[in-house]
Image (spheres, rainbow, N blue to C red):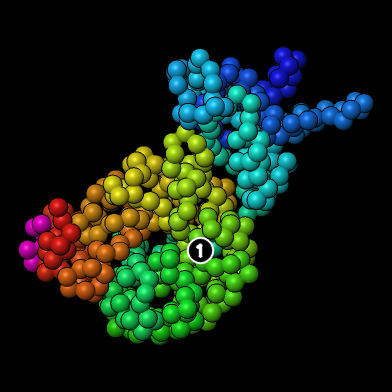
Amino acid sequence: MKPIDKPHFKAKKSELDLEQHIILTYFFESQTDPEEAALNLCQEQSTAQWKRVGVDEDFRPRHGAKLLNLEILEVKDQPFFQSSFNKGPKFYNCKATIAHPHINFGPKIPNMLTTILGEGVFYVPGITAIKLMNIDFPETFLKNFQGPQFGLEGIRNLLAVHDRPLFFGVIKPNVGLAPKDFAALAYESWLGGLDVPKDDEMMADASYSTLAERTKLLGELRKKAEAITGEKKFFLANITDEVDKIQINHDIAVANGVNAIMLNATATGLSAARALRKTSKVPMVGHFAGMTAFTHIPFFGVSSRVWVKLQRLAGFDSILFPGFNPRMRTTEEEVLRNVHACLEPLGNLKPALPLVGGSDWAGTLPSLYKKIGSIDFGVVSGRGISNHPGGPRSGARSLRQAWEAIQKNISLEEYAKTRLELQQALEAFGN
């Protein structure tokens, strides 16, 4: 970049109309001067060329991305990636804050992602690794999105649960069960106190267990379980499919009495989720399968926090992401950032219910509650319910009993002395 062009890609916040910009936070590694790399990043993702030959014009003032702040975090001798392209005596770890005019892509998620995570980001001269860490949206941009239809409070209202976390459970075995056997496990878990049994992300419309047959049985059993327990219940059906089948699957499931649907937007695209939001009759839950391929490397890709925010933008009422269990290989800080991304103020968009997933059971509930610091989350248990020695009814009961112990400020071990299901859970799954 020529020295004369550099000022055109810099700005102070006070010089900009921030309502006309989204604010992007990138972490990047540079093998060249960090400021020049950051300015190249602004140029490449916006006005890579800002005028026509022979025409007196300049599109940079209105359309150019602007560097607001640059921090050099570390200077080192080796790059993150060993590559023939990554050469240099020094490498710089940097944090850049960039204001990008949203007129460049409009309120369209595919076009926005093409811009802020596209060719003009991952092929910038001098940048050897880069990760989009956060996005902040102005009101003028957010008002174009519906966001969650029900959100946290809407889901609580539908289930009539306002004084505790919500309890979800994955039906296991996750694949292979015939519809009748699958539905029987869900029914047992409802009777034990589970709020929302669900399809696994790998169980959708399978040849041996069609969505139509499975949801018909589950719709009938859900009503029966509600009558017996006196509690409202959901079944969460996975309608992930080819894009032209998603609405059809939604309609089948809802007609059969299913009252929540799950979609993997990493696989179908966020635009497919946003389209479904316009017609969906029930709460939508987003699954994280596939997300980690883009988010897990600390210095490359996109953060899970950004992906959670985008799912909320697309209209998911509840968003599932990896939790605190060591199996999920996610730091406590990242989990809490994702919880916050579900709940934080976001223009006119309703808060979404955070769903913390990954090997949780009755024994992890106290630490889960303590770390999150509120009741506004859902816990997703798999084997802790389905593999409980007493079966899924006892597994669900153990979760409810663990919450009772928390409410009474009694240790799980002490409370389990008079609660068989909790005792069995501690013996089966405890260390």
On screen, residue 93 versus residue 36, left or right, reads left
Q: Nearer the viewer, residue 415 or 92?
A: 92
- Direction from residue 403 to residue 9 in the image, left or right: right
- Residue 319, percent across and down? 45, 56
Residue at x 34%, y 67% (from the top left corner) = 170
The answer to whether residue 341 is seen in the rendering is: no
Which contiguous range is marked in magenta? 413-418
Whether residue 422 is visible: yes
- The residue shown at (48%, 41%) is 303
Q: Is residue 179 above or below residue 94?
A: below
Q: Which residue is mark 1?
A: 263
**Residue plotted at (63% across, 54% down):** 145
- Quarter of the figure with residue 424: bottom left
- Residue 173 at x, y = what percent? 32, 70
The residue depicted at 43 percent of the width and 70 percent of the height is 203
Taking 212 as reference, is 326 above or below it? above
Q: Tell me residue 175's x, y (percent).
A: 38, 71
Is residue 144 located in the magenta-colored stretch of the structure? no
